[in-house]
Image (spheres, rainbow, N blue to C red):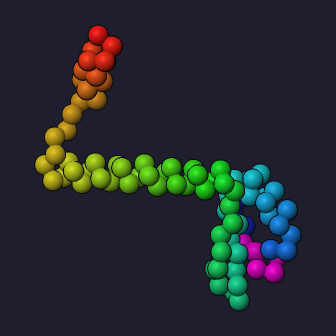
Amino acid sequence: MSQIIPIKDLENTNAISDKCHMEQEPVFVTKNGRGDLVVMSIETYEKLIDNAQVDLAIAESEDEIAKGGELLDAKEVLMTLRRKHFG
């Protein structure tokens, strides 16, 4: 479960780092009672970016199909590529 901490608690950076790595969740930092920062491990950030890229690719594909793009059967395409490249 994500944690919310006030900005003054950023003094204990090792504990925050350990928490981010152990729980693989971001820590939300508030300033004057409002959201200000998000702290997370590099691994969590990379997963977030990877998921966003997959989501974008899916959305682009759905948009292309909606605009009349050709829908291909994945098994047929893979078989064609294997024959082409591996004989």
Left or right of 46, for residue 61: left
Q: Position of residue 70 (x, y in %)?
A: 16, 40
Q: Name which residue lies at 82% across and 76% down.
A: 9
Q: Is residue 7 magenta?
A: yes
Q: Position of residue 5 (x, y in %)?
A: 76, 74
Q: In front: 33, or 11?
A: 11
Left or right of 44, for residue 9: right
Q: Position of residue 58 (x, y in %)?
A: 35, 49
Q: Name which residue lies at 51% across and 49% down.
A: 50
- Report the span colored magenta: 4-9
Left or right of 13, for residue 66: left
Q: Name which residue lies at 69% across and 53% down.
A: 24
Q: Is residue 51 magenta?
A: no
Q: In front: 26, or 87?
A: 87
- Location of the N terminus by quadrant is bottom right
Residue found at the very far bottom of the displayed protein: 32
